[in-house]
Image (cartoon, rainbow, N blue to C red):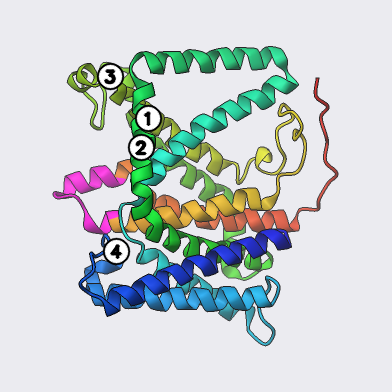
Amino acid sequence: MSPLTRTIVLLAAAGGALAVAVTALVMMLAPGLDPLPSSLAGHLGAGVELALALMGALTVFVVSVSALLARGAAPRGVSPGLLRGAALLAALLVALTTPGGIIPAAGYTFALTVIVGSVVLVVLVALRYPWLGLVLAAALVGLVVAAVAVGAGALIARIVGALGAMLPHAAIPLAHVAAAAGLLVWTIDQARGARGRLAIAVLRHRRLITIAAAACALPYAVARATWLTPWPLFGGSAELFAAEPEARVLGLALGAAMLTGGVLTLGLIRPWGTRFPRFFAGIGGRTVPPALAIVPAGVVSVLFTAAGLQFAFEGTGSISDTGYLLLMFPFWLWGPLLGLATWGYAMVRATTPARQPEVVPVG
């Protein structure tokens, strides 16, 4: 990563850690305040949960500030391996004390991001290949018209309104994610040149690890795709679609977002994860900045790991129901695998010599 990106990542980690530490202290000193949603560590008791959050946040803050003072590197006189171990442990503590309820907001946000991203991609293709862009634009407009016809316009407005209402409650969970993910991304960047046994194993099996991580998107995406058939799975029914036709659109949008996440995960091992596809105007053929993949993947890894482990631990009633939902939402597996895949990607990018960009002219 560039020095500027490294600084931004460390500042995000330090800022998030400071917010988490202050919140934990306030909750300790004023136990009468409304409690935050419980985290995975909350099963050990509120006092233990707050103590772990405070300890993890203070460690993240100290490591982040020390690295900032050392201009993004490990401070002199400190073992890099020991520092990375402390950073990972601190990030794990902060992640495991993340208040629950952030996954729904993240899911809806990503679904809206996919919609906006689709428009941007169509524009980039259209500028390079106008006729292909025209076909893609027509298909996109057709999807929008079909969605609006079943009331998706009002549905999107309600989703945006709901997200706006969630933001104040999501501030502290987001601080946890920023602190843990920022330090995880910095650790991955620092360990990109590692050659220990674990690093060698990750490099050797990184394709299998990445494919397994991407495959975690399939159960939910396939289940949502059945909503296009007369035999919908996972909450869909003819009665529901008749009463609320926009529900089908929402389910399909969330399924498409999950599938997009799986495809983006594959980018960690595909050529287009290293160089932008040639059919993109302006950026086609240019080298993808490593941070463009490492930072988002690090954030999602922390988010999925924290929420997935809590979801797996709490369950939802019977063993069969819990197993069914863990299969539909395998975040507990996707998060750790994505973290390892991202580390493998960073190591490969660090050892791949930079090449001159193949700039593709527009028109």
Magenta residues (range): 311-326
Q: Is residue 319 highlighted in magenta? A: yes
Indicate which disc residue 40 carries. 4
> Residue 360 occupies which quadrant of the picture?
top right
**Tag 4 or tag 2, which sits nearer the N-term?**
4
Considering the numbered disc 3 on the image, is that residue within a helix, a strand or a loop?
A: helix
Considering the numbered disc 2 on the image, is that residue within a helix, a strand or a loop?
A: helix
Relative height, residue 181 to residue 27 (above, below): above
Circle 3: residue type: Pro
* Residue lying at 57% horizontally and 80% vertically, measured from the top left: 82
Q: Is residue 217 left or right of residue 129?
A: left
Prevailing secondary structure of the magenta residues: helix
Residues at marks 3 and 2 touching, judged by CB atoms closer than 8 Å: no
Number of other residues with Cα within 10 Å of mark 4, as a class: few under 14, some 14 to 19, many 20 or more: many
Residue at the outermost bottom position? 77
Relative height, residue 143 to residue 311 (above, below): above
- Which residue does the numbered mark 3 point to in the structure image? 245
Circle 2: residue type: Gly
User: Is residue 345 in view?
Assistant: yes
> Residue 55 occupies which quadrant of the picture?
bottom left
**Tag 4 or tag 3, which sits nearer the N-term?**
4
Work out whether residue 27 or residue 190 is closer to the camera in this orientation and state it. 27
Residues at marks 3 and 4 touching, judged by CB atoms closer than 8 Å: no
- Which residue does the numbered mark 2 point to in the structure image? 161
Q: Is residue 202 highlighted in magenta? A: no
Residues at marks 2 and 4 touching, judged by CB atoms closer than 8 Å: no
Return the x and y of residue 152 as percentages of the image width and height.
Answer: 36, 22
